[in-house]
Image: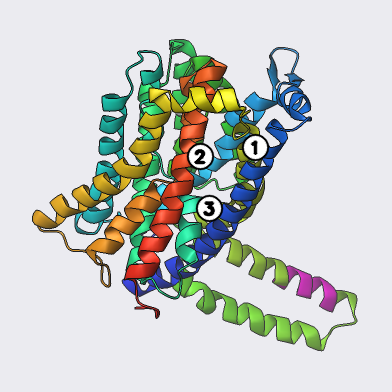
Amino acid sequence: MNVESPPPGVYKVRLARPIQHFLQTESASGFILLVMAILALTVANSPFSSYYGDFLHHHIAIDFGFYSIDRDLHFWINDAAMVLFFFLVGMEIKRELVVGELASIRRMAVPAAAATGGMVVPALIFFLIVDDAEARSGWAIPMATDIAFAVGVLMLLRSRVSTGLLVLLLAMAIVDDLGAIAVIALFYTATINVQALIIVFLLLALIYFLNRIGVWYIPIYFLIGAVAWVAMLESGVHTTIMGVLLGLMTPWRSWNRPESFSQIADPLMQQLKNDSQVEGTNLGREERIHTLMQVSELGRQTISPLDRLEHTLQRPVAFAIVPIFAFANAGVYLSMDTLVDVFNSSLTWGITLGLLLGKPIGVTLGVWIAVKLGARLPLGVNWLQIVGIGFLGGIGFTVSLFVTELSFNTNELLTNAKVGILVASLLSGIIGYILLRTVTRATKN
């Protein structure tokens, strides 16, 4: 299917509202995430802690006769529901790659350098501090950035920060997500079932073929995606990678060009006026319904599958799936003895300092190298603001907790890692907010 690329002006219109909607959703989601994390910590340290554990380990079975899955609720949250989160991440990455800040080498230089530095330096700090061989398997934990929390903190300063700083943080976080996904796929896969992986590739090829011939009936893709998820589960590769792959394969172009909508819709709207003149008769009613259905179908064909799915899934993912994930994974039992052990652990300090110091150092260093090589800072952004968003990048939370669950099996290591993430995320958010509030002007640039 050949679709002409719309002119540059159309991209601005196409991107403005989705980004605004995304920012509003992510900032509100960040607040809900904080509430759910506090709730999880409260319940885990209350007389109801045993119920909390029993609830998460309650088994749910799905039996198709020829195939069955019997796993606990924690699995269904982390390995099934979170696939939709990573599907959304995949679509956001694709948007940035085709029409956003990552669409050209010149524009992607600064956010890519910031994200790369913000992943490499925290990992190096982690390796320098952590001396236990088993604990070192969590080296990727401080590499992650929680976009919901980071955007939420920055949006508290919406009257003080420039659009360039907001876009830079978003693009940096998306590249960071891409890096985290690559790390999960490459380093957190134990054994590979080649036959299952071949089935995955065949199903992805089928999806690609259906895309190319113009089949945009979304339920078909969800059905194929569900089968591919099962195959990915059996392959040994983490199932969330399937979400990312499906997001990257989602068509971003619409069947009809947005600027041609009015040309096609105007005659239909005139037809509606004509139909209203004979309203009250069966003929007038039928023709009116037929015309309205044509307008509805035209609207559907003018919105790309990527835009439609992103708009549909953003709120359920932000306000249901990710908060539930936070509640299921942030609960840590903290007695005085536990706290002493936690802060004597090199794992805790490796994660804490990796996020709290490694992120701002790495982000700033990465951007400095990019600028020295010829890149330019976004309009209205200065170096202290770069340091500020580096601290916001130290809010690891969602993806850091996710990698923690992939890294460790023992309660001791899980507790040490989660405390490190929570402490670093809290301090990074506070320091980033204070620094950005201090160095930015009180009016929008």
Left or right for 245, reference 136: right
Are the two marked residues, 1 and 3, in contact with CB atoms closer than 8 angstroms? no
Q: Which mark is residue 41?
A: 1
**How far across and down, in percent of the image, does residue 22 sit?**
51, 60
Are the two marked residues, 2 and 1, in contact with CB atoms closer than 8 angstroms? yes
The amino acid on which the numbered mark 2 sits, given as a three-letter code, is Leu
Q: Which residue is mark 3?
A: 305
Left or right for 30, reference 374: right
Q: Which residue is mark 2?
A: 422
Whether 87 is drawn above or below 342: the answer is: below
Q: What is the span of residues highlighted in magenta in the rendered image?
A: 284-291
The CA distance from mark 2 to mark 3 is 37 Å
Q: Earlier in the sequence, mark 2 or mark 3?
A: 3
Q: Nearer the viewer, residue 418 or 314?
A: 418
Q: Nearer the viewer, residue 360 or 235?
A: 360
Whether residue 285 is visible, yes or no, is: yes
The amino acid on which the numbered mark 1 sits, given as a three-letter code, is Leu
